[in-house]
Image (spheres, rainbow, N blue to C red):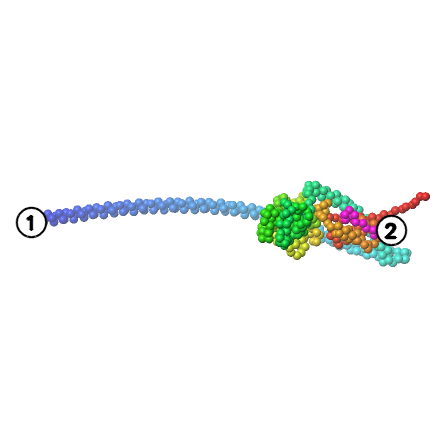
């Protein structure tokens, strides 16, 4: 029994001791954890206190800084206000001085006005007395002379008018002579300088083109069986083929240079190819037409490149190139336009105008001739429409509209283009004209003086560049001769169209002859 109790007792004692030890250990851990937690709490409290102190210091520094900035701004504002106040005080003082000065001036003006009013009354009184004296003198003069006032005035005025007419005519003649001498001298210098600086070869286009043949047999092949080849060529090209006895040559005749050129290239290609029949002719004609369009654009590009002009619409370039195949009195229109452009640029440089704008206006002045055979209207109206369509400068549009005098010129460049156009057209050999038109123009020129008082004879000389009018010396005096010259000039400008200028010379001559026997 004792043996059993002892182990049980040991077991109970061990359990109690283990429980006590476990409790002590847990108590120690709890105590240690409490101390550690208290330590952490204390550290946290210290850090919080430190952060509070730092934040308080920063807030104080920031508040101090803001206070200093605010005080500085207040000081600056006070300085500005003080300065503004000083300026206002100075301005107020100036205004006071000016007001005082104006008051003194107003007082002086009032005094002067009173004196003027008194003087005006005195003058009116004196004037009424003078009028009374004048009226009495006029009545006395009328009694002495036997003329009334109106009759005397009419007599004096008629005499004055007669004298003044002569003096005015003499003065106008002198001023006109001086102005003409100076204007002619200056214009001659400008024009001669421009023509010397630009000189282009004159080449007149004809209405026929000769195509050389390798042999006489080629004529028969061109004609074809029963003439079908030549009929096809003439039908599709619109050009007449003249095959005569001229050895190894065929003549293409047409007033349209573009058609004639297309026909020439087509015929040359057919001759080189050797296959000449209607189908081949139509094929080659279509191909040449397509190639010719590109060639036309190249003509336009070459013209603008030669003139140094840029910014042209491709459609406008093609229209410019078409001028190469248009003629005016035998003169190639594209060459004429390029020449006018060069001359316009030179004249504009002499006069200090825009050279590029003058060149552009000169190049486009006859642009309407490129398509005037396709649509109705004069080449001037068509040219204006083309320029407006491509948004050209208003100066260029006016130059196109006014270069024949149909519209008033609104700029110096428009007048320059008209002068350059006349120079290019009137150069010897530049244009061909038929004898019939030439004689008709001379007759019309001589007939302009028909019915004019005092005109005895009229002669058109210098190929229509000068009109000499012989007047009767007993009916026309020197001053009336100048008047007749001006009237003839205005009549010619109103009724005739002509290139260049026409000089009117009125000749009044008195001859005394005796015969010694």
Could one spot residue 417 in this view of the protein?
no
Q: Nearer the viewer, residue 259 or 469?
A: 259
- Residue drawn where x is 49% and y is 46% of the image: 73
Could one spot residue 51 in this view of the protein?
yes
Element class at badge 2: loop
Q: Nearer the viewer, residue 131 or 420?
A: 420
Give coordinates of residue 169: x percent, y percent. Answer: 81, 50
Q: Is residue 331 magenta?
A: no
Q: Nearer the viewer, residue 167 or 437?
A: 437
Q: Are marks 1 and 2 in contact (CB under 8 Å)?
A: no
- Residue drawn where x is 67% and y is 46% of the image: 247
Give coordinates of residue 488: x percent, y percent. Answer: 78, 52
Quadrant of the drawing holding the C terminus: top right
Element class at badge 1: helix
Q: Callout 1 environment at 10 Å: few (<14), some (14 to 19), or many (20+)?
A: few
- Label 1, label 2: how many angstroms apart (C-alpha)? 192 Å
Residue range in magenta is: 455-467
Q: Determine which residue is flagged by label 2.
A: 474
Mark earlier in primary sequence (1, 2): 1
Give coordinates of residue 211: x percent, y percent. Answer: 65, 47
Q: Is residue 125 left or right of residue 343?
A: right
- Residue drawn where x is 81% and y is 54% of the image: 450
Q: Is residue 460 magenta?
A: yes
In this view, the mark in front (1 or 2): 2
Q: Determine which residue is flagged by label 1.
A: 4
Give coordinates of residue 230: x percent, y percent. Answer: 63, 52
Q: Residue furthest right?
A: 517
Q: Callout 2 environment at 10 Å: few (<14), some (14 to 19), or many (20+)?
A: few
């Amino acid at each position: 029994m004792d043996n059993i109790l002892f182990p049980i007792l040991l077991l109970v004692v061990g359990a109690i001791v283990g429980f006590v030890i476990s409790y002590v250990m847990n108590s120690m851990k709890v105590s240690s954890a409490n101390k550690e937690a208290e330590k952490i709490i204390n550290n946290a409290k210290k850090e919080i206190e430190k952060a509070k102190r730092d934040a308080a210091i920063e807030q104080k520094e920031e508040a101090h800084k803001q206070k200093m900035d605010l005080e500085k701004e207040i000081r600056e504002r006070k300085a500005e206000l003080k300065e503004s106040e000083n300026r206002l005080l100075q301005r107020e003082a100036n205004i006071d001085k000016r007001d005082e000065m104006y008051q003194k001036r107003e007082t002086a003006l009032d005094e002067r006005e009173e004196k003027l009013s008194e003087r005006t009354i005195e003058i009116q009184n004196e004037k009424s007395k003078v009028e009374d004296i004048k009226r009495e003198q006029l009545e006395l003069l009328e009694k002495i002379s036997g003329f009334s006032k109106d009759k005397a005035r009419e007599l004096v005025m008629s005499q004055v008018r007669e004298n003044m007419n002569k003096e005015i005519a003499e003065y106008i003649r002198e001023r006109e002579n001086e102005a003409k001498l100076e204007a002619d001298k200056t214009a001659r210098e400008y024009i001669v300088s421009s023509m010397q600086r630009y000189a282009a070869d004159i080449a007149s286009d004809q209405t026929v083109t000769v195509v050389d043949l390798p042999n006489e047999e080629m004529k028969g092949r061109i004609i074809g069986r029963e003439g079908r080849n030549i009929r096809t060529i003439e039908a599709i090209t619109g050009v007449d083929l003249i095959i005569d006895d001229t050895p190894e040559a065929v003549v293409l005749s047409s007033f349209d240079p573009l058609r004639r050129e297309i026909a020439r290239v087509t015929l040359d290609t057919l001759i080189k190819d050797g296959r000449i029949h209607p189908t081949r002719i139509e094929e080659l004609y279509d191909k040449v037409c397509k190639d010719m369009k590109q060639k036309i654009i190249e003509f336009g590009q070459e013209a603008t490149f030669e003139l140094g002009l840029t910014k042209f619409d491709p459609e406008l370039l093609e229209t410019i190139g078409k001028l190469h195949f248009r003629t005016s009195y035998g003169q190639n229109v594209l060459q004429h336009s390029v020449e006018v452009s060069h001359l316009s640029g030179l004249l504009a440089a002499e006069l200090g105008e825009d050279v590029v704008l003058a060149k552009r206006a000169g190049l486009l002045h006859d642009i309407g001739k490129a398509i005037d055979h396709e649509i109705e209207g004069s080449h001037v109206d068509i040219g204006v429409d083309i320029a407006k369509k491509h948004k050209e400068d208003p100066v260029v549009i006016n130059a196109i509209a006014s270069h024949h005098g149909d519209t008033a010129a609104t700029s110096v460049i428009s007048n320059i283009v008209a002068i350059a156009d006349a120079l290019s057209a009137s150069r010897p050999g530049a244009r061909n004209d038929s004898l019939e038109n030439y004689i008709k123009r001379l007759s019309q020129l001589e007939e302009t003086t028909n019915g004019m008082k005092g005109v005895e004879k009229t002669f058109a000389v210098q190929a229509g560049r000068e009109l000499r009018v012989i007047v009767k010396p007993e009916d026309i005096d020197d001053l009336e001769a100048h008047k007749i010259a001006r009237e003839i000039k205005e009549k010619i400008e109103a009724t005739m169209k002509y290139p260049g200028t026409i000089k009117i010379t009125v000749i009044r001559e008195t001859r005394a002859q005796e015969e010694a026997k």
